[in-house]
Image: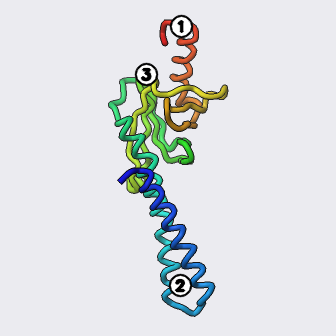
Amino acid sequence: MKPGVVLALTIFLPMALFTGSVVWVMVDPKSTMATAILITVAVLETPAIMFGIFHGMWKPLAMKYPPQEHAPGAITKRCQSFSIGIMNLSWSINTTVDENCLHLSPVKWMQFFGACPMSIPWNALKLQGRNGRRASLVGGPGIQGPEWCFQMLQMNSESSKEDPSAT
């Protein structure tokens, strides 16, 4: 199944079920069946949406940029905050930076829902803005993260400006 279909089904279907069960409880407040369905949907809605987001948005990127070995001298920091497209992943990405790639590895609970590690090569990223915290994938979504992660990209873009033959 296509990632967009998975994303749509796992986000919109639980929302429709929740809305329908709320309406049913409001129309017939004494119905134990309506209350049971509302509680069940409310409990399962968040995990279903997370599953859809990670399988529909994160996993296609991870398949395009599979994890690579970290180069010697790589810098690693745990529990960093990133935004990729519309996904805001606060304090949940273990990050490693080396001369070849930006390595993103989700924390364990995110991996349970389908997020998997990826290594984005620096040549697939383009620096955005002046603050050094934003980049965009070539032909893909924007990425925002800690400034230290994009210093290598910033150095590469500055050296390509100085040396036009480097591009």
Mark 3, other Cα within 10 Å: few <14 / some 14–19 / many ≥20: some
Residue 90 pos. (x, y %): 56, 47
Residue 101 tag number:
none
Residue 81 visible? The answer is no
Count of numbered tags: 3
Whether residue 127 appears in this view of the structure is yes
- Tell me: residue 70, above or below residue 116: above
Q: Is residue 111 left or right of residue 18?
A: left
User: How packed is label 2: few (under 14 Cα within 10 Å), some, or many (20 or more)?
Assistant: some
Image depth: mark 3 or mark 2 in front: 2
Amino acid type indicated by mark 1 = Pro
Q: Residue 167, image x and y in percent? A: 49, 13
| Picture disc at residue 99 | 3
User: In the figure, is residue 9 to the left or right of 15?
Assistant: left
At 48% from the left and 41% from the top, the residue drawn is 78
The three-letter code of the residue at mark 2 reads Thr
Q: Determine which residue is flagged by label 2.
A: 35
Between the C-alphas of marks 3 and 2, the distance is: 55 Å
Q: Which residue, given by chain and number where applicable, does mark 1 sit on? A: 164
Residue at x-position 42% and y-position 34%: 103
In primary-sequence order, the first of circles 3 and 2 is 2
